[in-house]
Image: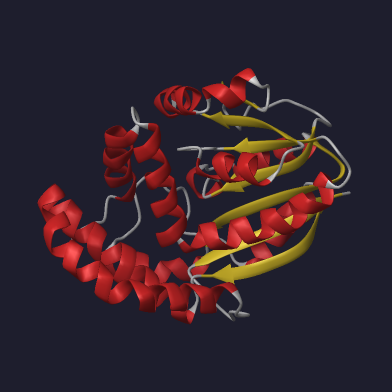
Amino acid sequence: MSKIAYDPVKDKFARIVKDSGILRRVFYFLLDLFFLRSWHIRKILKKKGADFEGKGKWKLLDAGSGFGQYDRFILETFQGVSVHSVDVKKDYLSDNSTFFQEEIKQNRIRFSEADLLTFNEENEYDFVLCVDVLEHIEDDVLVIENLSKSLKSDGYFLMHSPSHYSEEDAADDDTFVGEHARTGYSKAEIEKKLMEADLLPVETHYTYGKWGRRSWVLSVKWPMLAFTKTGLIAAIPLMVYYPIILPFCLLMNLSDLYSKNEKGNGIYALARKI
């Protein structure tokens, strides 16, 4: 089957919306709506961030910020947070700096080019966020160690990645981008790597389980295949397709959000610095 080029397709949309604040917010809304990992990450951020918010000013590192999707959510949800958003892609950082220029002026966020393999800030942050980044880096152990060192004592580290169960999809239809260094993590593997970096696992959970994966196939995988094969022409039939399937997909995402999945194609881990 055809390979789904997730990053190139998302990059095309990002280029379309980068010069419009309104379109960029629509883009963020669609990412939050269709990508189930965002449902889980925002749920945890809202809960744990409230603990820090009650104590006053706090600092968060977004390690591999991409389009700035979570930065927008964090800044709109919390008033006491200061965000340092880093990535290796200069174009992402440039676009984000333009969109968040008011927040930059208010010293609520700053953007920096950074390689997580050489990242060196110690005892600086209350919270580190790392979403769908570690699977791209061969020496993930070093990255986890660097990010752990950047945390203050009792600070939190939150990651999300494909899980080892994603091998089923990789073998079946080659849905993974070629730049992944590994298929994904098991609970035991990611917890071991966290503990070796002085991070105590608090909660480890499989995402994209039985219902979440079905939603992903209907709302993301098949439409992405259509865009990969036909480009923006696919938008025409999808305008009919989405109103039909979207309510069911949202219900399936909601089920995944509150289910204790025994397995799933994604995984998140929340850990505390010790």
Residue placed at 43% from the left, 60% from the top? Answer: 33
The answer to which quarter of the image holds residue 168 is bottom left
Q: Position of residue 186 (x, y in %)?
A: 60, 66
Residue placed at 71% from the left, 35% from the top? Answer: 146
Q: Position of residue 244 (x, y in %)?
A: 25, 76
In this rendered view, identify the residue nearer to me: 11 or 241. Answer: 241
Q: Determine if residue 201 is in view.
A: yes
Tell me the quadrant of the picture where the N terminus can be found: bottom left
In this rendered view, identify the residue nearer to me: 22 or 224. Answer: 22
Q: Position of residue 35 (x, y in %)?
A: 44, 59
State how the image is colored: secondary structure
In this rendered view, identify the residue nearer to me: 261 or 34. Answer: 34
Residue placed at 63% from the left, 80% from the top? Answer: 260
With respect to residue 43, does 261 lie above or below?
A: below
180 left or right of 62? left
With respect to residue 233, does 117 lie above or below?
A: above
Q: Position of residue 172 (x, y in %)?
A: 30, 71
